[in-house]
Amino acid sequence: SQDSKMASVVPLKEKKLLEVKLGELPSWILMRDFTPSGIAGAFQRGYYRYYNKYVNVKKGSIAGLSMVLAAYVFLNYCRSYKELKHERLRKYH
Amino acid sequence: MNENLFASFITPMMFGLPLVTLIVLFPSLLFPTSSRLVNNRLISLQQWMLQLVSKQMMSIHNTKGQTWALMLMSLILFIGSTNLLGLLPHSFTPTTQLSMNLGMAIPLWAGAVITGFRNKTKTSLAHFLPQGTPTPLIPMLVIIETISLFIQPVALAVRLTANITAGHLLIHLIGGATLALMSINTTTALITFIILILLTVLEFAVAMIQAYVFTLLVSLYLHDNT
């Protein structure tokens, strides 16, 4: 019983986001690795998570590619929102 | 409408940061690499397509010309994927910028021509005078052939830019016309919508054809010079 109590205390830095308690959230965010290599690592992990879940499977479907393209369209829309909001259907522009 | 028509061709910047770099690099995300023998569906499809295209395009070259296979295949993949991604709504197409197309055309053309001049000097110089020209015409013909040689990279770049830009502009215009006509006369709007669908199909074809043409011409210039 002593060993199980010791094993259940995981240090804050290594917890995943969903396991962090709400009160611990600010300190968790501050402890994340914001160096360039840390950010690059985060992107790499994210890429491989998506790739291995949707594309690198035995019977990958069109959804794996479509979700990427949909996100691309959405990001481009956000980028050009400033010019696009003048094209709304209004009586007076 | 006038200002908005060309607004989609402005280089995208955000807070002064060049977003265009990310947009140019984005197609590379869609072509994953793998060193396995049997891959997932995406990579298998891409490899099959690549094999098909490379066999068809590199078969006319000799050994020296076939060292360009990697370059030409990357070229056709890049231009094809960039053009096709540009057909998505609100996206920015780098190949509409003349600067980028010149940056692709001039080095490739110059590489082919200089290779020809270094390795087969007499044959390269002989290209300036077609066989069987009457003697009085020779000076003028040499000038004309020189001009036609130097116009090749410009033609490559401008062809790609003009085709893609014109297609995008037409889609914008006809789409805008359909929207405007919907409240006035629905039948005309329907006809315009059908025109828009046909145009989009054409643009898909043009996107791929332009990539093919660009690469084919570079490969032809290479063939002349190896």
Image (cartoon, coloured by chain):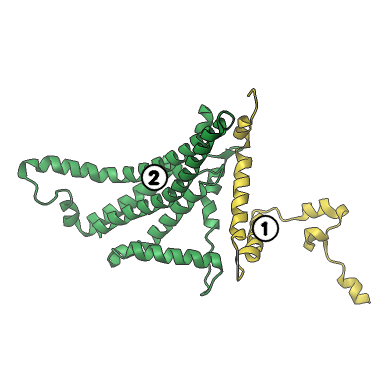
Chain colours: A yellow, B green
Amino acid found under the numbered disc labelled 1 = Ala
Q: Residues within 10 Å of mark 1 (few under 14, many from 20)?
A: few
Q: Is residue A25 above or below residue B15?
A: below
* Quadrant in the picture for residue B226: bottom left
Residue occupied by mark 1: A42
- Residue occupying the far front of the picture: B187
Q: Say if residue B67 shows up in the picture.
A: no
> Does any portion of residue B170 appear in the rendered image?
yes
Q: Nearer the viewer, residue B26 or B188?
A: B188
Residue A28's spot in the image, x, y percent? 80, 55
Q: Position of residue B42 (x, y in %)?
A: 54, 64
Quadrant assignment, res B147: top left
Q: Disc 2 marks which residue?
A: B160
Badge count: 2
Q: Is residue B12 left or right of residue A36?
A: left
Furthest residue in direction left, as rendered: B135
Mark 1 falls within which chain? A
Q: Height in image: A55 above or below B182?
A: below
Residue at left offset 27%, top offset 58%: B223
Instruction: Say if mark 2 contacts mark 1, CB within 8 Å.
Output: no
Q: Chain of mark 2?
A: B
Q: Is the residue at mark 2 from the same chain as the one at mark 1?
A: no
Q: Secondary structure at mark 2?
A: helix
For the residue pair B167 and B198, the one nearer the viewer reads as B198
Question: Residue A47's x, y, as percent?
Answer: 63, 59
Task: Identify the residue at image location x=42%, y=41%.
Answer: B99
Q: Say whether residue B101 is left or right of residue A14.
A: left
